[in-house]
Amino acid sequence: MLSTEHKIAISDARDLSFIDDQSVDIVVTSPPYPMIEMWDELFGMLNPEIAPALERDESRVAFELMHKELDRVWSGLLRVLTRKSTPTRPVSAPRPPARPFRWKKPRGDV
């Protein structure tokens, strides 16, 4: 009979240093989604530059800063996942309505 070992870790996915390289077969995650209002406060706590950018209606800046936080998660997941595995998220996760996303025209000559 096949023997398996299971561990559940509940922690900040931006720091997976406690997990060995290529030692995880599956990750199920439901990360916060950038530019969806219900996650603005959380992203603001993760990076103090995000909330002021949202208050100034600088959507593009806030979007990039939010994705920088998520990039830390994705790079950590790629390190710990075995080469045969794939990260996934719950398919039944509710999708709240997105906030209007407005790209601002660049100022000056770009």
Image: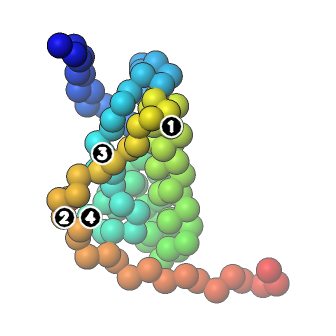
Kind of residue sitting beneath label 1: Leu
Please tell me which residue is depicted at 49% across the width and 33% down the height of the picture: 83
Kind of residue sitting beneath label 4: Met
Figure quadrant of the C terminus? bottom right
Q: Is residue 92 left or right of residue 39?
A: left
Real-space CA distance between mark 2 and mark 3, rounded to the nearest whole angstrom: 13 Å
Real-space CA distance between mark 1 and mark 3, rounded to the nearest whole angstrom: 13 Å
Badge nearest the viewer, 3 or 4? 3
- The residue tagged 3 is 29
Earlier-in-chain disc, 1 versus 3: 3
Earlier-in-chain disc, 4 versus 1: 4
Decide which of 79, 2 is in the foreground and name it.
Answer: 2
- The residue tagged 1 is 78
Earlier-in-chain disc, 1 versus 2: 1
Badge nearest the viewer, 4 or 1? 1
Residue 42 visible, this angle: no
Give how far across and how far down residue 78 sits, in percent.
Answer: 50, 37
- The residue tagged 4 is 38
Q: Are marks 3 and 4 in contact (CB under 8 Å)?
A: no
Please tell me which residue is depicted at 29% across the width and 42% down the height of the picture: 28
- The residue tagged 2 is 94
> In the picture, residue 7 is in which quadrant?
top left
Badge nearest the viewer, 1 or 2? 1
Real-space CA distance between mark 4 and mark 1, rounded to the nearest whole angstrom: 27 Å
